[in-house]
């Protein structure tokens, strides 16, 4: 039973990491200056665009390889809460035709929160560095 949960967590971890990595890369490919300007237009400091993009890129990589999964997932959860409240809430769950709604943000938030509470040890770099007794997994289940 525990192995099924770990495989599920691995799938969620790698998926969330990959999606955030892609979002971070796209911010730079599309011109980070455009994102800086957009942040400023919605009342956020422009420099935060760099921070968000870097968290998405490095956090995405960290999740994919399983490094600091709970911490990175908590950062992603905060990003999703901020994006939903600051930008997406006003356009509604499914959007308004010009901007996507917050349905995807909620899905990312749910995945991130799952990983915050449950972690993901299988095939993780953290497991290699901070090796725990494999019987500990069995005791938790």
Image: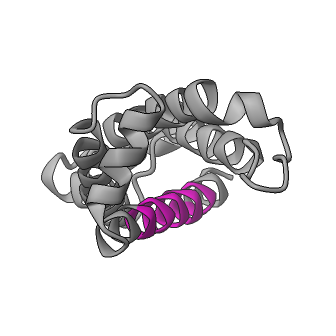
Q: Residue at x 83, y 39 (%)?
A: 93
What is the magenta range?
Answer: 7-23
Q: Vertically, is 56 above or below 119?
A: below
Q: Residue at x 41, y 32 (%)?
A: 74
Instruction: State the residue lying farthest toward the left.
Output: 129
Chief SS of the magenta region: helix
Q: Where is residue 101 in the image (x, y as percent from the top left)?
A: 76, 45
- Which of the pair 113/31 is nearer the observer? 31
- Which of the pair 98/8 is nearer the observer? 98
Q: Where is residue 31 in the image (x, y as percent from the top left)?
A: 30, 68
Q: Where is residue 83 in the image (x, y as percent from the top left)?
A: 54, 35
Q: Is residue 21 magenta?
A: yes
Q: Where is residue 5 in the image (x, y as percent from the top left)?
A: 63, 52
Residue 62 visible? The answer is no
In the image, taking residue 44 as reference, residue 105 lies left or right, namely right
In the image, taking residue 53 as reference, residue 76 lies left or right, namely right
């Amino acid at each position: 039973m525990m192995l099924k949960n770990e495989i599920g967590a691995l799938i969620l971890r790698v998926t969330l990491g990959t999606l955030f990595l892609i979002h971070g890369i796209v911010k730079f490919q599309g011109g980070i200056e455009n994102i800086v300007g957009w942040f400023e237009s919605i009342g956020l400091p422009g420099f935060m665009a760099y921070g968000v993009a870097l968290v998405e890129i490095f956090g995405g990589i960290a999740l994919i390889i399983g490094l600091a999964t709970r911490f990175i997932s908590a950062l992603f959860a905060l990003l999703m809460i901020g994006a939903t409240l600051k930008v997406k809430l006003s356009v509604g769950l499914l959007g308004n035709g010009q901007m996507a709604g917050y349905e995807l943000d909620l899905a990312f938030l749910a995945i991130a929160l799952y990983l915050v509470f449950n972690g993901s040890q299988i095939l993780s770099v953290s497991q290699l560095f901070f090796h725990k007794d494999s019987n500990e997994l069995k005791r938790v289940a």
